[in-house]
Image (cartoon, rainbow, N blue to C red):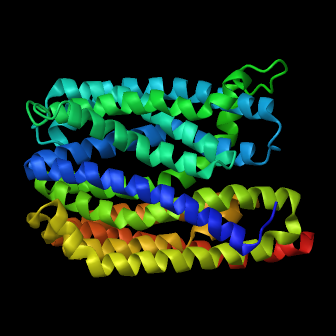
Amino acid sequence: MSTKSPSLLLTSIVSTIARFAGVGLNFAVAIVLTRNLPMDEAGMVFMLMTLVTGVSLFSRLGVEQWLVRDVARIHDGETDSQGSHLRDAYRMVLLSSAVFIVLWLIVTPLLQHRLFDDAILMWPLLLAGSGILFFNLVMLNSAFMKAVRHTSQSILIQNSLPAVAYMLLILLFWKVFTQQQNYLLLYIASLVLAGLWSFYWLRPWWKNLHPAAPIQFSIRDVLKQSLPLAPVSFFSFLMLWADTLLTGLLLSNEDVALFTVAARLSFVSLFFLGALDATIYPRLLKIHKHQPEQVVRFFWQTTGLVAGILGVVTLLLLVAGDVLLKVFRPEYVQAGTALVILLIAQFVRAMSLTFSFMFIIQEQVRYLNIMLMSALVVNIIANLVFIPQYGIEGAAGATLLANLVLTGGVMILFFRNRLLIDQGRLL
């Protein structure tokens, strides 16, 4: 496998284009919702999306990280081994999803009262629990495609499928989608459709899910390997989750809509970061195992690539922020200051990407988990202090502070533990 920069850059460009297509589709859905629904109802949709995707993330227990890490190290021709890993990931996630769906049903009355101000109907909120399983299928199938280095397909499955499914259903039921909270039912149906649709890209591996001589992982085996990796998956979403949930608890549904639109715009940079993640991480894993002499060069090459691409994207979004907010509706320009803070926060977060990979690869993930948990605690405390005083700008400031703690801590530990230098001594 070549590690030359033109090859890496070309792959990154292709995956970024695929990611950008997903960004456009997700924004199209958000714009349709904000332009056709009152601000408080748009806030309810965004809150439900945050809840379902967040609970789904927790229910996976880091399995997708385990799947990417182990499958990326398997030679391309060993499809039986790849299929065995995927089968056991499905088995683990089906069980954990069922547990979390039951928990969802139990706490639904509390969610209705505390997060939706009793404005959401009970039965769509109950049905939304099913979205946990189907969104997990989307994410597992996307993770597998990432592991086997089908980067563009992985990105399209994760980012485009749910948005395409939701948009198709909105168009199909256009005349009634704003009535009686049908927009919530269509969102739930879109997750079911996307989960089933995501299997289409895994056709070459269907027959390998039950190989003649399978590698067998018990649920305990999978958990033992996936749980230490779970915080890496949880962190970014946990901070958004904390920001959105605490905004919902302390402020109104309208404020949730404003903050969510600003957060979605700031996530444009994270979509680019996700494209780089999908390109860099599987390559770095494979190079570390099969071409260790290339690791140091590849690490700094990709770190520069992340800084360059994310820096340009962040600057463009800072310049165009108010114009983009007006696209949703002129009222959303109120979120301009929060958007600026969040864009800076996401750039700071992006700078920890490649450094974080090395903790996982060098099996020092416990240090990374300590920094992730520390940053999350800072985020929650800062939200409780800042939101009552500064509103949605306070929630954005809490994210920036937490990301500074994370990136600063990760870099300090990276150099203190001499991860790249230690790798160099192994060469």
x, y percent for residue 145: 62, 43
Can you see residue 391?
no
Q: Which of these two is toward me, 337 or 200?
A: 200
Compared across the picture, whether 327 is left or right of 207 comes to left
Compared across the picture, whether 23 is left or right of 58 comes to left
Q: Which quadrant holds residue 53?
A: top left
Q: Residue at x 48, y 64 (%)?
A: 272
x, y percent for residue 335: 18, 69
* Badge count: 0
Can you see residue 80?
yes
Compared across the picture, whether 138 is left or right of 240 comes to right
Q: Which quadrant holds residue 129?
A: top left
Q: Residue at x 27, y 71 (%)?
A: 339
x, y percent for residue 241: 35, 52
x, y percent for residue 124: 21, 27
Q: Which quadrant holds residue 258?
A: bottom left
Name the quarter where the N terminus is drawn.
Answer: bottom right
Q: Which of these two is toward me, 220 or 21?
A: 21
Please say if 94 is above or below 38: above
Q: Which of these two is toward me, 329 or 300?
A: 329
Please say if 93 is above or below 117: above
Compared across the picture, whether 281 is left or right of 136 comes to right
Name the quarter where the C terminus is drawn.
Answer: bottom right
Q: Residue at x 42, y 70 (%)?
A: 346
